[in-house]
Amino acid sequence: PKGIVGMWDSWRGNARALRAASIAEEAGSDPDVPPPAKIVRGEARKPGDWSASNPEPQPAE
């Protein structure tokens, strides 16, 4: 079904444009140069911080 693929393509393109614009607004840079690495690193850092601040109890030997 070409209709659903076209809908998804347009939605994905629109979302990407909005995301790039908002990222550029936060970073104060051009929308043509979005920093996706910063987002990935930020999201990947959360589990590490959580496990570091809340370590699992270890059996004392």
Image (tube, helix red, strand yellow):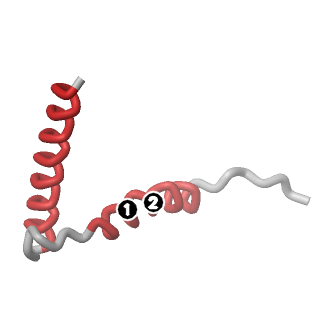
Q: Residue at x 10, y 76 (%)?
A: 29
Q: Residues within 10 Å of mark 1 (few under 14, many from 20)?
A: few
User: Residue 51: which quarter of the image?
Assistant: bottom right
What residue sits right under mark 2 in the picture? Answer: 44
CB atoms of marks 2 and 1 within 8 Å: yes
Q: Residue at x 68, y 51 (%)?
A: 56
Looking at the image, the residue that sits furthest to the front is: 2
**Near-viewer residue (33 or 25):** 33
**Near-viewer residue (60 or 38):** 38
What residue sits right under mark 1 in the picture? Answer: 40
Q: Is residue 16 left or right of residue 61?
A: left
- Judged from the image, the secondary structure of the residue bearing numbered disc 2 is helix
In the rendered image, which quarter contains the C terminus?
bottom right
Q: Position of residue 59 (x, y in %)?
A: 84, 53
Q: Position of residue 5 (x, y in %)?
A: 22, 32
Looking at the image, the residue that sits furthest to the bottom is: 29
Whole-angstrom CA distance, mark 2 to mark 1, is: 6 Å
Residue type indicated by callout 2:
Ala
Q: Residues within 10 Å of mark 2 (few under 14, many from 20)?
A: few
Residue type indicated by callout 1:
Val
